[in-house]
Amino acid sequence: MNLSEIKQIILQESLREKRIIIRNGILVLMLVVILGFLIIQFALPFITQYIKNAISEVNDNKSFGTYFKIIFVVIALLSIYYQLIKLLPVFNRQKNINKVFSLIKSGKKCNIINETTIYLTIIPLYRIKLKLDPITFLEVTIGKNNFQLPINKILSPDIKRGLSNANSTHYQSIMSELYNKNEIEKSSEIITTKLKPLSEFKQFAEKEFSQELSSMEKNRSKGKSMLYVQSVVIFIFLSSMIYFFFTNKIQITYSQDIFILTGYVVAFSVLIGLVSYIYAKKNMAGTIDFTQFKNIIFNRLVQYINPSFEYIEKSHIGLTEFLDSGLFKTKNYTINGADQIIGKYNGVPFQSCNLAVTFRPNFRDEKQADDTIFYGNYFVARFPKKFEGSVLIYSKKDFLSDIKDNEIGSYLNISDTKIRLEDPDFQKQFEVYCHNQIVARYVLTPSFIELIKKINIQNKGNIYISISQNNIVIATNKRNASMYGNTTYKIFSTKIDLELLNNIYQELIGQLQMIDTLKLLT
């Protein structure tokens, strides 16, 4: 998908958003007119009398009455202003979209920050709300400018790759081989990759990354310390105000005292923010922004393993590929992700990415969160053996583990026959489902079983595997080292050092070593 195609998709979503907003505005206006007519016809005398009584009570308290009237007018004006401000970006959306793509074409880098979904139409029905007309926004930054781009949720992974300037031809080539149902001709020219041991990588990382990591960690530590100081100062200030109030050292005699006190609190907050900004600008000069950890480090790390591999920070597989594994029930899941690596390792196509998969059942109470179906690494590689059907392998969970786990157990696809194997230790760790006992035994050789047990122990019993006629999927339902930098908050609370980099490297080569083992099974 090229930039022109992405632009057209975003413009179409922008027009859809505008049409829904205008339609909803007309409907609300009609409801207001109807409600107003009914009030005039049936309730006007009662409302008039109520307002007169309220005004009379306000006027009796002269010191408060003036403030009440002013506040009432200000709140009314702010309510109207807020609604107009919300509409302004919608009608400026097309202009901003054109600006985004002009900047990208001029060579500016587009950084993807976040992906969110909102509902443009919400109908309250007692304890639940009927949410309609969802629209997904991609928050991006170009230079110092921030933009919200309405996108088609299904095409989100493709749009992210396009905006990230990823090699779409290379990506499509790898994914086509990975999900091709037919047997692929082996290339006569296979680039051999020799995985370097951790000791050798440590020497490389010390030389290549140590200064940058040290600068990022300095930036992160100072930012964290500054946040702690701000929190302590604000806590002391508010605690002092509460203490003085309850000990009558601060007395609120008149209504205007409330506004004066509020003014002090606001002024103090602004002062703290200003001092913090000046301090940060002065003391963090010369350091590298720690939030750019992935952007600066990861691509070079992946290139170190193999220069032909491609790392796309904000890319991931889509719903179609996720359901292709057969591990999960077919539903319209919401998929977000990052850290996609694609390539061919010793002739075998693969992809690896981190996913956060959620689902919201119909008619759920608004206060309840969505079900988290999967959270972790999703690895796919071409499987060397040819057979019909599929083999699904699920980690067994005890009662306590199941309570601490997310909702993955409720969404696993258990439609085939449960298979029993001769390895008792494997039976304790896993449940195996396949349409045919012979096929399961053909695929799960003793050496392969030992490998799966080893991987499961390394990942604390959170492995879910699908093996089909064309590929193998290893879904690890746990947070991994590379996921700590996916958001500003996560990297803010993570120490940035060589140890973090070593852990990430071990995870990456561990997946590739799986491919080496699979090739030995043929």
Image: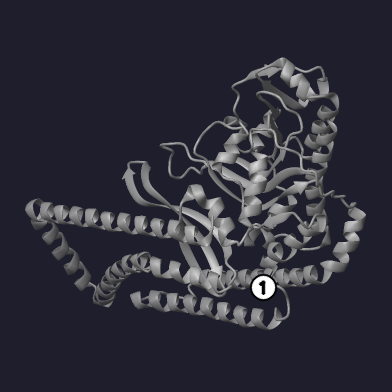
Q: Which residue is mark 1?
A: 226
Front residue of 196/270: it is: 196
Q: Would you place residue 91 above or below residue 434 in this image? A: below
Residue 372 seen in the figure? no
Q: Quadrant of the C terminus?
A: top right
Front residue of 104/298: it is: 104
Where residue 411 appears, x then y in whole percent? 57, 32
Task: Specify few, some or many for label 1: CA neighbours under 10 Å numbering under 14, 14-19, or 20 or more.
Answer: some
Q: In the rendered structure, which amino acid carries the disc numbered 1? A: Met
Q: Would you place residue 67 above or below residue 298 in this image? A: below
* Left or right side of 257 for 245: right
Q: Would you place residue 162 above or below residue 264 in this image? A: above
- Report the residue at 73% width, 76% height from top: 287
Front residue of 456/400: it is: 456
* Left or right side of 467 for 422: right
Residue 268 seen in the figure? yes
Q: Secondary structure at mark 1?
A: helix
Where residue 451 appears, x then y in whole percent? 83, 33
